[in-house]
Image (cartoon, rainbow, N blue to C red):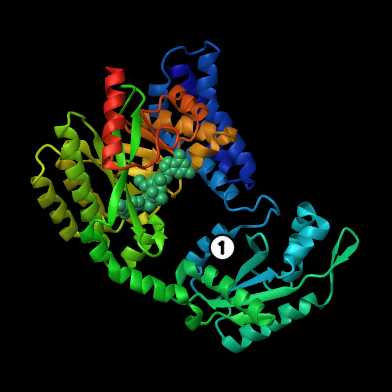
């Protein structure tokens, strides 16, 4: 398999020498795509019928990982753009907020947006938003983001209250005159909201939007975000106080999403996903629950609660004659906590043989997982027989070759790429080449977010090991999972 490898290697070296001069990410992406398809295309043309794996392995050493990284960067960029207006989106704003921690987030709602849509139609309303953004750029050197259909937002590095207030007044004045849309004057009624970035992190954008709504209800043109209006903070506080009792009563518990083994052709694994159906507030979003629990220092008890429940359920499945491997999510901050690792070891001592049937998923999207303490902790867990899996692969900054520092045996390709395979050729290619490279590096690969049979087929074609998603099954109770796995394992036998 050296011919495709050699050609690809040559192309890679060329790409590397050009890369520094290439500014346009589209060109880089194009080259990366060509490079990735090349070995497969040559093989298809009969020029290299032999497995491409050894060539891929060689490439992995010299930096195919970097090329995939470049592709990922381009894909990530497209996820940061609003397709309607081409402006950067809310996600982009939240990400830059994590970098510049100073100043205010300012948003402007087009208070009469509904009328604009009614009169001009949706396509032209998009144009109105674009013109509004252009006008706002007179106010700020920072890029204006399209954060909601009827709202624009940006970061203002100004930290002084007075100056900030003057800026927003100036913003209001900008809309005394109609904006021009294809020669037609359109009146835009602004409602501004301002929130300080200090200490509120990614929630600042929501707070600024809340302030704009507040302004609108009061009939004002703008308002500050007021902590008193933050019903959300009281809400979160009282919720956090209930977490421990809810764990004890079992109100907080895992459900299980089946994983289908493409080689064995049966369901022999599941991911535990936490759920809390609150008696008054209804189902609490798992990601908000995790964020809340992390903020209140309860993430270790919650993770141990989910782990203990999963091990108990797994013991019951085993007693019923169904072998099911179970995966539990672990927040990236936890492995550095030696008390947590010791608690996991103590817990596993009560479940003989369970470690080999257990996976711990660590998300890749935090840089924290590369610190020496975390690597050492993961090695300790792996030595017990636990499989370490890299969750949400593709959303963070690491390339596969970089991840090799970690004692992980599995990667889970993030659902955004898998769902994207339905419509995007570059997502298909990204997933297929990631699978090939991961195999060359001896990882097993799980694809999550498999929603259709068509995507399942593509993944099977690409040699994926396990799939998880609505097409296989939604997250379900331990008893339902047991019945489903039993049925599937009997059918396969
Ligand atoms: P994750 O670990 O990446 O879990 C996969 C998420 O994708 C789950 O959302 C699952 O319900 C959803 N999903 C599964 N199949 C499909 C599909 O076909 N299409 C789509 N669109 N989505 C699908 P869920 O349960 O809301 O969990 C969200 C995240 O919350 C998880 O992402 C994980 O990061 C976190 N999480 C959940 N349970 C726990 C836990 O016990 N501990 C920790 N630390 N985090 C948890
Ligand atoms: Mg997970
Ligand atoms: Mg995931």
| Rendering coords of residue 468 (x, y %) | 39, 35
Q: Is residue 395 visible?
A: yes
| Rendering coords of residue 459 (x, y %) | 45, 28
| Quadrant of res 312 | top left
Image quarter where the C terminus lies is top left
Along the line of sight, the residue nearer the viewer: 447 or 87:
447
Asked whether, in this view, residue 80 is left or right of residue 353, the answer is right
Asked whether, in this view, residue 452 is left or right of residue 23, the answer is left
The residue lying at 32 percent from left, 64 percent from top is 294
Asked whether, in this view, residue 59 is left or right of residue 335, the answer is right
Q: Name the residue under label 1.
A: 93
Q: Outermost residue toward the bottom?
A: 162
Image quarter where the N terminus lies is top left
Q: Is residue 103 visible?
A: no
The residue lying at 60 percent from left, 35 percent from top is 423
User: Residue 175, relative to residue 63: is it above or below?
Assistant: below
The residue lying at 34 percent from left, 43 percent from top is 390
Beta carbon of the mark 1 residue lies under 8 A of ligand 1: no
The residue lying at 53 percent from left, 31 percent from top is 429
Q: How crowded is mark 1: few (under 14 residues within 10 Å), some or many (20 or more)?
A: many
Q: Outermost residue toward the front?
A: 279
| Rendering coords of residue 281 (x, y %) | 40, 64
Q: What element carries label 1?
A: helix
Q: How many marks?
A: 1
| Rendering coords of residue 63 (x, y %) | 44, 37
Q: Outermost residue toward the right?
A: 183
Asked whether, in this view, residue 228 is left or right of residue 247, the answer is right
| Quadrant of res 194 | bottom right
């Amino acid at each position: 398999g050296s011919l495709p490898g050699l050609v690809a290697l040559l192309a890679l070296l060329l790409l590397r020498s050009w890369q520094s001069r290439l500014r346009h990410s589209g060109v880089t992406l194009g080259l990366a795509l060509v490079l990735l398809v090349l070995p497969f295309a040559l093989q298809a043309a009969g020029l290299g019928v032999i497995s491409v794996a050894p060539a891929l392995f060689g490439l992995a050493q010299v930096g195919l990982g970097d090329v995939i990284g470049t592709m990922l960067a381009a894909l990530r960029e497209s996820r940061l753009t609003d397709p309607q207006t081409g402006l950067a989106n809310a996600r982009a704003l939240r990400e830059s907020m994590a970098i510049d921690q100073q100043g205010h987030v300012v948003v402007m709602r087009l208070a009469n947006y509904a009328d604009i849509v009614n009169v001009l139609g949706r396509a032209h309303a998009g144009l109105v938003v674009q013109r509004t953004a252009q006008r706002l750029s007179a106010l700020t050197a920072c890029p204006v983001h399209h954060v909601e259909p009827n709202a624009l937002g940006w970061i203002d590095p100004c930290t002084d209250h007075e100056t900030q207030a003057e800026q927003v007044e100036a913003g209001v004045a900008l809309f005394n005159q109609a904006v021009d849309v294809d020669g037609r004057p359109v009146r835009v009624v602004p409602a501004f909201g301002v929130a300080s970035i200090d200490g509120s992190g990614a929630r600042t954008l929501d707070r600024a939007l809340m302030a704009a709504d507040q302004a609108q209800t009061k009939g004002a043109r703008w308002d500050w975000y007021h902590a008193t209006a933050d019903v959300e903070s009281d809400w979160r506080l009282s919720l956090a106080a209930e977490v421990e009792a809810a764990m004890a009563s079992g109100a907080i518990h895992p459900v299980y999403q089946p994983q289908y083994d493409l080689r064995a052709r049966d369901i022999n694994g599941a991911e535990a996903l936490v759920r809390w159906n609150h008696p008054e507030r209804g189902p609490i979003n798992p990601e908000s629950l995790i964020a809340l629990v992390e903020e209140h220092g309860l993430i270790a008890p919650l993770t141990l609660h989910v782990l203990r429940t999963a091990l108990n359920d797994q013991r019951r499945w085993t007693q019923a004659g169904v072998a099911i491997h179970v995966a539990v999510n672990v927040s990236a901050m936890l492995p550095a906590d030696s008390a947590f690792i010791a608690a996991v070891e103590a817990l596993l001592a009560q479940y003989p043989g369970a470690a080999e049937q257990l996976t711990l998923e660590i998300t890749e999207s935090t840089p924290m997982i590369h610190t020496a303490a975390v690597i050492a902790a993961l090695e300790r867990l792996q030595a017990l027989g636990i499989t370490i899996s890299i969750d949400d692969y593709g959303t963070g900054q690491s390339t596969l070759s970089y991840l090799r520092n970690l004692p992980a045996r599995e990667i889970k390709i993030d659902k955004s790429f898998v769902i994207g395979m339905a419509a995007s050729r570059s997502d298909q290619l990204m997933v297929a080449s990631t699978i090939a490279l991961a195999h060359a590096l001896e990882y097993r690969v799980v694809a999550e977010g498999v929603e259709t049979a068509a995507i399942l087929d593509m993944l099977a074609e690409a040699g994926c090991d396990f799939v998880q998603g609505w097409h296989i099954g939604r997250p379900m109770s331990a008893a339902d999972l047991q019945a489903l796995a039993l049925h599937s394992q009997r059918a396969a036998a």
